[in-house]
Amino acid sequence: MSRPPGQEPEERLPATRPESLPAPVERFAAPASAHQLALTPERAASIVRQSSNARWVGFLAVLFVVVFVIVYYFYDLGFPGIANSSREAKEVAAQQVTSVEAGYNLFEANCARCHGAAGQGGIGPVLNDQAKLYVHLNPQYIMNVLTVGGRYVCGNPTSLMPVWADTNGGPLNYVQIQNLIDFIRAPNTLTYTIRDNSTNEPILDSSGKPETAVGWRDPNYTPAPGATPVPDCWSSALTSSPAASGAPASTPAPGETVVKLDASNIAFTQTTLSGPANTAFDLQFNNQDASVPHNVVIADSTGKAVFTGAIFNGPATQDYAVPALAPGTYSFHCAVHTNMTGTLTIK
């Protein structure tokens, strides 16, 4: 091709890429099977297997949850017909034992010197009497006495029973007050461990086993029909005994048999006595416990009282005119401190 005269030929650039541009990437083509939309038998079988496995996993998970809920339900609320099988009942029982054990130590440290180590009484009234524990020594009554002191019992402003609750200036807080109430009201079906007050470790007996004790209250106790109610003031029973069946004699009659009985440290010194059969005799009772009430009750083999002496404070001596008794073995005890017992043989 001819160029016009005087025109220079056009300059051409070399056919090369700029160094700043990346090199072209090699392209790959997927196999034809990857673009197939049809469901092959192998693929269908794989999907079925995966779906079946997923259903089994879901079923087992649901079954596990259902079994867990059922087991926990019975664990928490208890099994039907099985008493105290629930978690709550077991925890309450464990806390009750712990409270009674703490209450025992508080009672021994602060109350036993007046009411006796076993609640048998002494300077203060008896606490382990079933008739009292049945209704009189209820939790609210004990709380009131511990809160305001002995004046609540007999209206005596000079009562030796002090205030124990710290809400009124006493030394015990509300937890300790509750522990004392739980101890006094503990049933005899509850066994607790006696623990050291400073270390809370069990006290071991001679065989190396922890010492245990049971509560005072009998849950199955019911007063006999026509039983005399417990008086509001315990000291009112010390001046006279409405159930006394024998008037005290100032001195034995001439030739009358005299049977002597002593009491010391809230216990009978003689636990075995003997008397004449079918003959009245004088029971000379020497109460050596200062400011502590005692009496003597004689009962036959069925437990029925055949003689009840008047209650009186020591130190003093009381002569009881015991009527004639038939031959046999009788028991005797103190109506105020029921732990004081003995055996009377009439022959």
Image (cartoon, rainbow, N blue to C red):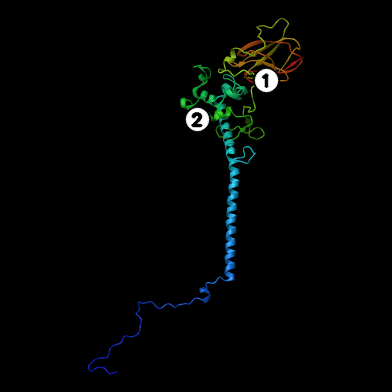
Q: Say which quarter of the image contains residue 326.
A: top right
Residue 161, given in percent of the width and then of the height, sits at 52, 20
The kind of residue on which mark 1 rests is Thr
Residue at horizontal 60%, vertical 55%? Answer: 60
From the viewer's perspective, tell me whether residue 170 is left or right of residue 344.
left
Q: Say which quarter of the image contains residue 133.
A: top right
Residue at horizontal 64%, vertical 11%? Answer: 318
- In the picture shown, does residue 238 fall above or below 27? above
- In the picture shown, does residue 230 fall above or below 249? below
State the quadrant of the C terminus. top right
As drawn, the label of residue 138 is: none
State the quadrant of the N terminus. bottom left
Query: Sequence order check: which comes first, mark 1 or mark 2?
Result: 2
* Residue at mark 2: 174
The kind of residue on which mark 2 rests is Tyr
- In the picture shown, does residue 65 fall above or below 95? below
In the displayed image of the protein, which residue is found farthest to the left? 6
From the viewer's perspective, tell me whether residue 150 is left or right of residue 248.
left
The Cα atoms of the two marked residues, 1 and 2, are separated by 37 Å
* Residue at mark 1: 341
Q: Secondary structure at mark 1?
A: strand
